Amino acid sequence: MGDIRRFLNVKSVRKLEHFSFNLFTFHFSRNSGLGTHVFFGSPLLLSPLTIIPYILAMEVIFFRGKRYFVKLKEHVVGIFILREKPEAIYISSLAVAPECRRRGIATYMLNYANKLAKRLDKKWLELSVSKTNIYALRLYRKLGFTKKKEKKWSFILRKKPI
């Protein structure tokens, strides 16, 4: 596989577009972390009674965030949500389609957020990551993120925009 990053583009999307994408293309959490569904377990257990309330809850939590799709041609291969804080850009959510992982897309998204934080003269780029998501932790550390705070199930990481 060659480097596809030069073919990627970031598109800001409206909340409704993001919501409908999550509702109908809800597979970005598959194989996250340690190879399982992060929140729901087996895909056989997923049902509209579980998925729809979860997506609605996430939309409420991410309400103030700016939503982005990362597209390869016309296909969405990544999604992320950024929230502006007084001293930081906070990455509220970041996901790469399972079939496109390990191809530099997450790095591309993090670099985009880094450039935005720098352009907005923020002191920090911050995010939260599950303690069990070793692949994401490895990537974030490689890109210069360090631990700001430890919670029961996650770490808050940050780095200075460069």
Image (cartoon, rainbow, N blue to C red):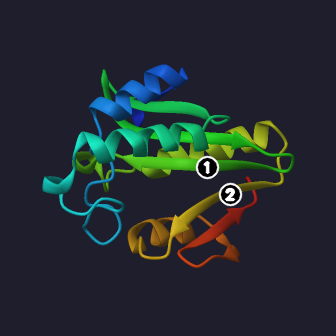
Looking at the image, can residue 2 be seen?
A: no
Q: Residue at left 48%, top 52%?
A: 107
The answer to which of 55 and 4 lies nearer the viewer is: 55
Task: Tell me which corner region of the image, top left, top right, bottom left or bottom right, holds residue 63.
Answer: top right
Under tag 1, what secondary structure? strand
> How dense is the environment of label 1, judged by Cα within 10 Å: few (below 14), some, or many (20 and up)?
many
The answer to which of 114 and 54 lies nearer the viewer is: 54
106 versus 62 height, above or below: below
96 versus 34 height, above or below: above
> How dense is the environment of label 2, judged by Cα within 10 Å: few (below 14), some, or many (20 and up)?
many
Q: Amino acid at mark 2?
A: Glu
Would residue 131 appear left or right of 89 to someone viewing this image?
left
Q: Amino acid at mark 1?
A: Ile
Q: Residue at left 71%, top 75%?
A: 149
Task: Quote the CA–CA distance across marks 2 and 1.
Answer: 6 Å
Q: Are marks 2 and 1 in contact (CB under 8 Å)?
A: yes
* Residue 68 drawn at (x, y percent): 52, 31
155 versus 28 height, above or below: below
* Residue 121 drawn at (x, y percent): 85, 42
Under tag 2, what secondary structure? strand
Label ID, residue 91: 1
Q: Which residue is mark 2?
A: 126
Would residue 36 appear left or right of 153 to someone viewing this image?
left
* Residue 153 drawn at (x, y percent): 53, 75
Q: Residue at left 56%, top 40%?
A: 81
